[in-house]
Image (cartoon, grey):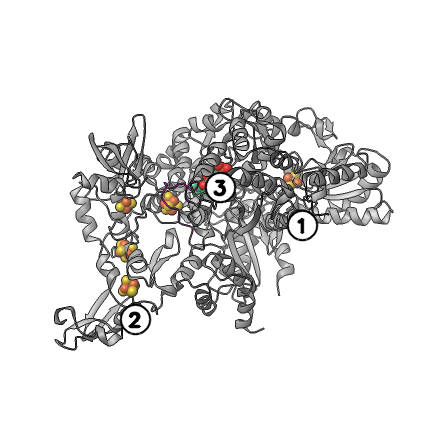
Amino acid sequence: MTDPQRLETIMSRYAGVAADLIPVLQDIQDEFNYLPKDELKVVAQHLNVPLTRVYSVATFFKMFSLEPRGKHLIRVCLGTACHLRGGQRLVETVGRRLNVGPGHATEDLQFSLETVGCLGSCAQAPLMMIDDKYFGRMAVDKVPKILKPYKP
Amino acid sequence: MPKFESMNHLEEYRGRLLSSRNPQEPQVLVCGGPGCLPMGSEEVAAAFQAELKQRGLNGNVVLKESGCQGLCAKAVKVMLRPQGITYQQVTAEDVPEIVEATLVNGKILDKFCYQDPADGSVKAYKSKVPFYQGQRPIVLGKMDLIDPTSLDDYLAQGGYQALQKVLGGKSPEAVIDAVERSGLRGRGGGGFPTGRKWRLCRQAPGDVKYLICNGDEGDPGAFMDRAVMEGDPHAVLEGMIIGGFAIGANQGYIYVRHEYPLAVKRLALAIDQAREAGLLGANLLGSGFSFDVKISKGAGAFVCGEETALIASMEGDIGEPHPRPPYPAVAGLWGKPTVINNVETWANVPAIMSHGPEWYAAIGTENSKGTKVFSLVGAVNNTGLVEVPMGTTLRQMVYDLGGGIRDGGEFKAVQTGGPSGGCIPKQFLDLPVDYDSLQSVGSIMGSGGMIVMDETSCMVDVARYFMSFLHDESCGKCTPCREGTKHLLEILTEITKGNGKEEHIPLMEELCDTMAAASLCGLGQSAVNPVRSTLKYFREEYEAHILHKKCPALVCRPLLKYTVDPETCTGCLACVRECPVDAIHGEAAEPQVIDQELCVKCGMCHAVCKFDAVKVES
Amino acid sequence: MKNDSVSLTIDGKPVQVPAGTALLLAAKANNIDIPTLCYHPELKPEGHCRLCVVEIGTAPRTRLVNSCTYPAEPGLVVQTASAKVLASRRMVLELLLAQAPAGEHLKEMAAAMGVHETRFKKGDPAARCILCAQCVRTCREVVGVSAISMAFRTPKKRVATPFAEQSEACIGCGSCVFICPTNTIAYTEKDGIRTVWGRKFELQPCNKCGNYIAPKAQLEHWAKLTGDPVESFYVCKDCR
Ligand SMILES: Cc1cc2nc3c(=O)[nH]c(=O)nc-3n(C[C@H](O)[C@H](O)[C@H](O)COP(=O)(O)O)c2cc1C
Ligand code: SF4
Ligand code: SF4
Ligand code: SF4
Ligand code: FES
Ligand code: FES
């Protein structure tokens, strides 16, 4: 499918009112892996909202990215329990192994590294997630082995 | 599943369902809750399936994936019914042995049972494990009994009976009365009386009203609502339908944070099932009342847990709170009267309607009725989800349920209420936990996060941590919060770096006063609690950082010094490989030396040394 | 309900105002001035700056609320200059002085309230914006084009055009510039060209006197709103 077709498919699921803005952006991000500028302009027209509204929302919420993201999303938890059990060190280790800072994608767009407020599995702190898979009771020396299957 | 046309129809179906079920049937319930999932519960469940099949037992033994079984520290948890045996730390490899010994030969395997740290005794049955003994499960009651994806399981446990009772002859006012008399207060943080909120909304002028379930659960360190949405989604729906009937709303929404994909999936499934069964939709159960529920996914903003910000984002705008009044109960979603309640609040409603308000009000303390679910995490042995009567003391939670401090450590503080709460020191261990007593010591109940800290936690660092979280999550609309969190973070960071000044303390106190009093929403108003409470109860730690440039808990990196103990170092070079700045030198198999000039104090060497040869001091 | 009048006490003085009147206006109607930074009579109040806080209730159960949105209620006791209010105002001003060290109006206002310095670390010395959102609200509510909005949140929150590019929606009217209390928004007019938010607008001269009326884009916007031909706006107010 071409990009306009992909967007068309998403928009066809909605009534086209302002309240659909966040769900539409979530679907676009799922489909395109980020929020491409051109698509956002079309969304504003379709939902009949000013482009400023789309831009405000796209920059306000943490899950949205205006830049292409990596194929695999790594989320390291920095919730309280994880912070107390070395979450920060975990982010740094992952970042160093992949040569990427939190909030960014690797150059080859294989990974994006993000930190999150809490993943909700605090009993297994520290915790990280790659795509939809959880890794509990992490330790810095487990990182290479966990990353391996995701590498190109 | 038929579409129930009437309450009798549902009751008949339930009767047939119950008589077709053999209470003595052997069941294996593998925990699929938030604590066990990351520890491989799916693999364990798959192993059971394969093993049962291979032995031809799949016809006799029912295998289910349950919601959180509570004792998440001992993941993966497995419950064996009808005996009520609770196994722990089960891996896929253990499964054949468990099937052979326990399921086939009826033998209990001690190594998978809880061992009481007090006397080393082995507890095989759930009813004997101290962690469960002090609890009073109402909201979590069905967690380890049902498969959350099965409406039949929920019905078999008496699900939707409360709804039948309500639709079968109670007036909306009577429902509100009952909720009011039960003493139920909001479980999302504020503790506002639920019945009163519903009444305000019912009385607000307007034909169209809405109802929202707040499943944003943004407090780091809290996963109660996640466990309920994933483990017993129909209870939330049932509560909402009853609420809709009481306030006169025909549409409800569940707002779930996007970090909880499984909760979204389970709720969506439950909604579909309920619609199909005629428990949602037009004229439900033939009662003439219509109600439907939609899911809204959050997009990553802590402030969207605040009710007016949540509503703004549901309307497709940024999550900036709005000044109240007007309150949502009068003018909420699309300007219509709207009741917002927390997940756990909704999940309490069916139990209250089933057993009656008096039953509920008999549990708890004078002004805080019922139970509260806490996520007990941090430095305790038994981390997990607990549900206790209001008024249970912190000591009971930490020592009786929590099994004491892990690694034989010393209790230092317990943090309740997430980033909006405070750190409670040792002298208040006997405090009964309820809304008012927590507030009296400078914390709040919040949504139920309970993070236990031992002497390895630095309280200045804890305050800095919460402030950095809050600064990042502040929406930026109002000055005291936007700028206040910035400067508190800035000052706290300077202190943890050893650049603190004595005048910083009174300046922070003064700033906290304004933030608490003048911020627009609860985020800014309560952002000061972690700072105020640590300043009040742990001032000597601030002073150690400011006056002596030391971090007694050995946490604040710039104040630490790492060295290698030549006696214990084996020269394995693990630390050398991890050091990001190549500050560690020495020959292989010889003791290593850390170049203090280069060292950035990241602590990697300390974390990876298998021989405990890297020493840290402040 | 809206027309009912309510009695309340402001600074010890009994006053009567229509129910629902914002405390700020109730005070003003009784000659009590409360300082504000984000309030404007033409805009829906949103309570951004928190300078206008007042203390309500009676001791010991009092609290601060922002007077620009809090409605007058029967029997309410309001203090507009209590110790708590003054302390909070000064602290907010100190915070704003650190945020916007170049804001002249802000400095004057602060000085008038006895705040001459901030104890907090100052940000960019050239910064002026205090995020009061008056520009954004004007463009949305009064001009009706929503060419600018708040982007990002706290650490990076700022007023911006979409993608920080030239805005197609902007009509170059300059309303945002004129309303800004801190003179933040860059704006120039030279040789018949107005530049605002990085975009150049050609100004239309009056068919009669030759003085510049407004950007062509703005006149086109008016034409669209009224349905009149755009040429009908090519004569300035004075020549009409
Ligand atoms: C910053 C902030 C975050 C909040 N987050 C949540 C949340 O995640 N879940 C929740 O139920 N309530 C949250 N609340 C409280 C809600 O605003 C609201 O009071 C609550 O949902 C009402 O439900 P209850 O009466 O059942 O507690 C939050 C409040 C604030 C100020
Ligand atoms: S207190 Fe913080 S989160 Fe709440 S409105 Fe103000 S800036 Fe936004
Ligand atoms: S100049 Fe542009 S941005 Fe400013 S108010 Fe006019 S239209 Fe809006
Ligand atoms: S640019 Fe001016 S009007 Fe706009 S938010 Fe900043 S200070 Fe307020
Ligand atoms: S998630 Fe399995 S016990 Fe809590
Ligand atoms: S004038 Fe009321 S908050 Fe700014």
| Residue B413 drawn in magenta | no
Residue A109 seen in this snapshot: yes
| Residue B330 drawn in magenta | yes
Distance from Cα at disc 2 to Cα at disc 1 = 52 Å
Label 2 packing within 10 angstroms: few (<14), some (14-19), many (20+): few
Q: Give x and y (percent) for residue A21.
A: 47, 59
Residue B3, placed above or below residue C222? above
Q: Chain of mark 2?
A: C
Amino acid at pointer 1: Glu
Location of mark 3 (residue): B340
Which quadrant would residue B171 be assigned to in this image? top right
Distance from Cα at disc 3 to Cα at disc 2 = 45 Å
- Which element is circle 1 on? helix
- Which element is circle 3 on? strand
Relative placement, left or right, of B79 versus B185 is right
Q: Give x and y (percent) for residue B151.
A: 69, 44
- Disc 2 to disc 1: CB gap under 8 Å: no
Q: Give x and y (percent) for residue B515.
A: 34, 39
Location of mark 2 (residue): C227
Q: Chain of mark 1?
A: B
Location of mark 1 (residue): B276
Q: Give x and y (percent) for residue C131.
A: 30, 52
**Front-most of B208 and B160?**
B208
Amino acid at pointer 3: Ile
